[in-house]
Amino acid sequence: MEHVTSTDGTRIAIRETGSGDAVVIVNGAFSTARDAEGLAAALAERGFRAVTYDRRSRGDSGDERGASPVDPVREVEDLTAVVDAAGVNVAVLGHSSGAVLALFAASRGVPVRHLFLSEPPFHFGDGDPAADLVDRLQSAVDEGRGADAVTLFQREAVGLPDEVIEQIRQSPLFEALVSLAQSTVYDATLTRDVSTPTPGMVGIGIPVTILCGEQTFPFLSEAARRLSEAMPAAELVVMPESVMHRLDADAAARVTADRLR
């Protein structure tokens, strides 16, 4: 594990697996770099150098936000630092909110060779969470109620039913989610601010591959379809191996390798 330093001084933890051209992996909500180890190994087996990182306020990364308002641009700066450290000819593979971040960052000039966007949760303005969700999440975190922030995000941002939320809350893995409570504020802010991709996002001039599981949540299938329609030059790839918003590592690595050779 190494660290790079973002613009505001936040130290971002990165890990590299394999050798060759770099593919930076950007995880979604409640995920750390360790959750991408399977995908990193699959990419390494195909001759790539997989770069995983802990997004700010997760895992071994810091968070120097201080009193500044939450701004998705900070995460763009984090990703820029990771891409710069990875070298040249870098591709980026983002999953869920990580895909939203990857596309947003590319639209702001982060140098990317090819974007792979796995099930980005764009609402396109339909069924957005409540406007005050971000403020309520931050208040819960500031008051030391990280568990409440986690369940609030699961209920209102993800749309999980209460019985599933309760099962998760009783799981021994719940404490690991609570440690990521501040990151729910960042994910909620990002997906609120770009619920609909901006003209700059849909107009980027680099190759884009949109990945979607054959069996996933209808909202995500619709988001992938609408994004592909908004980006006529993009390729939409439906993967039978990815089920219910879980990106299949081998299938994703295969699709990535086929398009980067």
Image (spheres, rainbow, N blue to C red):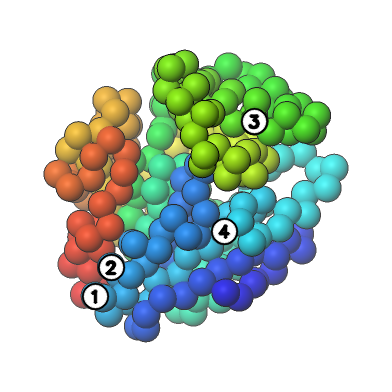
The residue where tag 1 is placed is: 46
| In this view, 111 is above or below 199 | below
Which image quarter: residue 227?
Answer: top left
**Disc 4 marks which amino acid?**
Asp
Disc 2 versus disc 3: distance between alpha carbons? 33 Å
The residue where tag 4 is placed is: 54
Foreground pick, 23 / 247: 247
Q: Is residue 85 left or right of residue 179?
A: left
The crowding category of the residue bearing disc 1, from other C-alpha atoms within 10 Å (few below 14, some 14 to 19, many at least 20), is some
**Disc 2 marks which amino acid?**
Ala
* Whether label 2 touches label 3, CB < 8 Å: no
Residue located at (77% from left, 49% from top): 65
**Disc 3 marks which amino acid?**
Ala
Disc 1 versus disc 4: distance between alpha carbons? 23 Å
The residue where tag 2 is placed is: 42
**Given this view, does label 1 or label 2 mark the residue nearer the observer?**
2
Quadrant where the N terminus is found in the figure: bottom right
**Given this view, does label 2 or label 3 mark the residue nearer the observer?**
3
Horizontal and vertical percent position of residue 146:
69, 33
Which image quarter: residue 8?
Answer: bottom right
The crowding category of the residue bearing disc 4, from other C-alpha atoms within 10 Å (few below 14, some 14 to 19, many at least 20), is many
Residue located at (73% from left, 29% from top): 145
The residue where tag 3 is placed is: 147
Horizontal and vertical percent position of residue 144:
78, 33
Quadrant where the C terminus is found in the figure: bottom left
The crowding category of the residue bearing disc 2, from other C-alpha atoms within 10 Å (few below 14, some 14 to 19, many at least 20), is many
Badge 3 or badge 4: first in the primary sequence: 4
* Whether label 1 touches label 2, CB < 8 Å: yes
